Image (cartoon, helix red, strand yellow):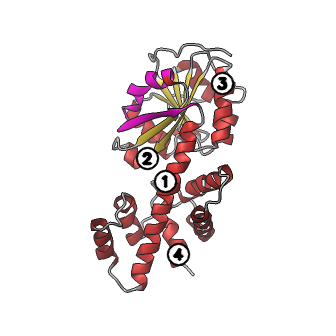
């Protein structure tokens, strides 16, 4: 197995996947090149290979691990290249990718992000990183451009595992808030006052600050899409060897919301699965 030293980061940083997270990362890191399957989103690049050739560090901001693998398949990856994969993907797949890429002298970090693209633009996200500790340290200053903190969790795949755990709790907090607000409506309580009281009470969670108003106003402009979290919940259930009864119920709620047409809406639209008959 090759153990090429990570390249000193002197060339432009590149981003593959110019959706909400990728676009936010470009703005915060000062990356000068970005590629997306949607050519209208590309910045100074017409192919992914251009980024692999011209950049020392390439962020992968893609919907799932299968798409990550398809982008990397057949790519000309130079030894010393650092790939930072922010995808919430399959931990087993990401660990396998780390081994395969290391054999080519390519450094792979699964650097999952706790927080939305909007929070990233405020430098208010946590990055949970799996991979070589030395490569993590090499990228620490880069992480500091968009994250309030970056934590090295362990070997490749560890960041993805931790993201699933944190997303499980985060998603259930969001679902609990949705059910609580729906319950308040059913009891003829003022939802704005209800949210204010919950924020002051022991029921408080940070999700009330980011999703409460969206649920009350029914403004589901996406910060993070509902279907993406449904994908995450399915990954949790597949990865676990123990029952996850609350997550199983959450999956059913998200699938109902998706069937109602809210898959591309903000994940706060989970409340529609409770309000709609």
Residue 145 appears in the figure: yes
Picture residue at 55% right of the left edge, 72% below the top: 273
Magenta residues, start to end? 134-155
* Residue depth check, mark 3 versus mark 2: number of the one nearer the observer: 3
User: Residue 43, position in %: x, y?
Assistant: 50, 32
Picture residue at 41% right of the left edge, 27% below the top: 140
User: Residue 104, position in %: x, y?
Assistant: 67, 18
Measure the alpha-carbon separation of dots 1 and 3. 29 Å
Q: Which mark is residue 117?
A: 2
From the viewer's side, name the closer residue of 200 and 142. Answer: 200
From the viewer's side, name the closer residue of 159 and 24. Answer: 159
Precedes in sequence: disc 3 or disc 4 = 3
Quarter of the picture containing the N terminus is: top right
Precedes in sequence: disc 1 or disc 3 = 3
Disc 1: which residue: 224
163 vs 230: above or below:
above
Disc 3: which residue: 101
Residue 48, magenta (yes or no): no
65 vs 238: above or below:
above
* Residue depth check, mark 2 versus mark 4: number of the one nearer the observer: 4
* Residue depth check, mark 4 versus mark 1: number of the one nearer the observer: 4
Measure the alpha-carbon separation of dots 2 and 4. 26 Å
Is residue 130 found left or right of 188 in the rendered image?
Answer: right
Asked which secondary structure carries label 1, the reply is loop
């Amino acid at each position: 197995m090759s153990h090429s030293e990570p390249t000193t980061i002197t060339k432009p940083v590149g981003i593959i996947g110019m959706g909400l997270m990728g676009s936010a990362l470009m703005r915060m890191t000062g990356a000068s090149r970005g590629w997306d399957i949607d050519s209208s989103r590309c910045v100074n690049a017409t192919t992914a290979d251009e980024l692999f050739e011209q950049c020392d560090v390439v962020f992968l901001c893609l919907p799932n691990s299968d798409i990550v693998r398809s982008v990397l398949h057949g790519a000309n990856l130079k030894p010393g290249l650092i790939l930072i994969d922010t995808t919430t993907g399959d931990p087993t797949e990401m660990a396998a990718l780390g081994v395969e890429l290391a054999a080519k002298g390519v450094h792979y970090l699964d650097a999952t992000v706790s927080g939305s693209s909007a929070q990233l633009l405020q430098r208010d996200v946590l990055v949970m990183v799996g991979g070589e500790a030395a490569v993590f340290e090499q990228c620490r200053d880069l992480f500091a451009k968009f994250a309030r903190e970056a934590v090295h969790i362990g070997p490749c795949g560890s960041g993805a595992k931790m993201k699933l755990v944190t997303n499980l709790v985060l998603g259930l907090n969001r679902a609990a808030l949705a059910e609580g607000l729906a319950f308040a409506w059913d009891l003829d309580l003022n939802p704005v006052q209800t949210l204010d009281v919950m924020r002051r009470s022991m029921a408080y969670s940070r999700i009330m600050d980011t999703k409460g108003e969206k649920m009350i106003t029914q403004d589901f402009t996406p910060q993070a899409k509902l279907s993406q979290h449904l994908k995450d919940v399915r990954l949790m259930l597949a990865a676990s060897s123990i029952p996850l009864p609350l997550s199983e119920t959450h999956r059913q709620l998200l699938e109902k919301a998706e069937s109602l047409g809210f898959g591309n809406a903000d994940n706060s639209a989970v409340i529609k699965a409770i309000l709609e008959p």
